[in-house]
Image: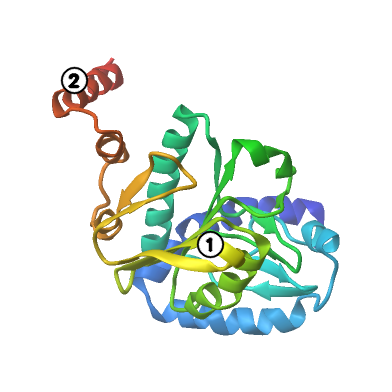
């Protein structure tokens, strides 16, 4: 395919990438078809390569991870999955930025561990570990990794990734299952093993890695999801009248 043809197809490709979560949500059979297609793609993709070769081969729209030299393809996220990821990115990103704690990154961004290159849905890298950030990937463990489960990824997220993140030194691993309305939060304990610090469909989880940050788990199941601004106000204990005044000021600024 020549360069001109590739360029002419870019708008179509961007539309597909943007709209695919909505299409999957509206037509569940599409997910199974994609899983089957990706299984065939896994055969046609290069079977083994170094991590450097993988980074060269994959672009930002390639739905793939690298595990011990093998390329693993995966299916696109659903709209519900993407909405939760966006919500957490906003809330955590603003909190982390205001407290100068580090950076929050959302997929697609690779985390390179000893035997794998994974793409968690969300990463937090603490300020003292920002030297691990490279142009194309995180060279070492994140301080927090978040995975939002889908039917296709549940076994991988609770199985292979759990043990890889544990062995790699990811300090907190958050597993969120929107279909079951269930969340599990793991923290590295003595001996470098994960311990469950919270699990359930409702209640508050308080992070040790992000000082002062907590989540009310039931926020994640609301449709539509709560306002990021109101969520942050509750997290930091902002008084209702202060929040109301701030919202009025924002509304006025938008109208102006």
Separation (CA) of disc 1 from disc 2: 43 Å
Q: Which image quadrant: the C terminus?
A: top left
Q: Of tags 1 and 2, which is closer to the observer?
A: 1
145 horizontally vs 177: left or right: right
The image position of residue 225, as x and y in percent, is 27, 51
- Circle 2 Cα neighbour tier, 10 Å, few/some/many (<14 / 14–19 / ≥20): few
Going 49% across and 31% down the picture, which residue do you hit? 97
235 horizontally vs 66: left or right: left
Going 66% across and 41% down the picture, which residue do you hit? 129
**Quick check: marks 1 and 2 in contact, CB under 8 Å?**
no
- The answer to whether 48 is drawn above or below residue 128 in the figure is below
As drawn, the residue found furthest toward the left would be 241
Question: Would residue 14 be visible to someone looking at this image?
Answer: yes
Task: Find residue 67 and report its image quarter.
Answer: bottom right
Numbered disc 2: secondary structure: helix
The image position of residue 141, as x and y in percent, is 66, 55
Q: Nearer the viewer, residue 175 or 43?
A: 175
Task: Find residue 235 and report its image quarter.
Answer: top left
What scheme was used to colour the molecule?
rainbow
Q: Could you say which disc has been placed on residue 232 in the image?
A: none
Q: Which residue is mark 1?
A: 189
Question: Would residue 22 be visible to someone looking at this image?
Answer: no
Q: Which residue is mark 2?
A: 245
Numbered disc 1: secondary structure: loop
- The answer to whether 248 is drawn above or below residue 135 in the figure is above
Between discs 1 and 2, the one toward the N terminus:
1
As drawn, the residue found furthest toward the front would be 190
The image position of residue 249, as x and y in percent, is 24, 18
Number of marks in the image? 2
Q: Which image quadrant: the N terminus?
A: bottom right
Going 73% across and 84% down the picture, which residue do you hit? 43
Going 68% across and 74% down the picture, which residue do you hit? 72
């Amino acid at each position: 395919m020549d360069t001109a043809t590739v360029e002419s197809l870019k708008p179509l490709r961007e539309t597909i990438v943007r709209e695919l979560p909505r299409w999957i949500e509206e037509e569940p059979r599409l997910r199974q078809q994609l899983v089957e297609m990706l299984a065939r793609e896994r055969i046609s993709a290069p079977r083994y390569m170094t991590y450097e070769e993988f980074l060269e081969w994959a672009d930002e729209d390639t739905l793939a991870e690298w595990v011990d030299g093998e390329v693993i393809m995966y299916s696109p996220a659903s709209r519900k999955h993407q909405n939760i990821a966006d919500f957490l990115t906003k809330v955590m990103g603003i909190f982390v930025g205001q407290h100068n704690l580090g950076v929050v990154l959302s997929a697609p961004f690779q985390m390179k561990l000893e035997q794998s290159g994974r793409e968690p849905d969300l990463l937090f890298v603490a300020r003292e570990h920002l030297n691990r950030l490279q142009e194309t990937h995180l060279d070492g463990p994140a301080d927090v990794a978040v995975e939002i489960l889908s039917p296709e990824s549940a076994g991988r997220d609770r199985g292979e990734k759990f043990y890889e993140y544990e062995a790699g030194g990811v300090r907190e691993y958050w597993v969120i299952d929107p279909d079951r309305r269930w969340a599990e939060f793991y923290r590295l304990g003595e001996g470098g093993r994960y311990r469950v610090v919270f699990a359930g469909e409702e209640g508050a989880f308080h992070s040790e890695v992000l000082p002062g940050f907590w989540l009310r788990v039931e926020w994640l199941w609301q449709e539509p999801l709560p306002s990021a601004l109101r969520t942050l106000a509750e997290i930091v204990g902002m008084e209702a009248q202060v929040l109301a005044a701030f919202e009025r000021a924002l509304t006025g600024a938008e109208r102006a």
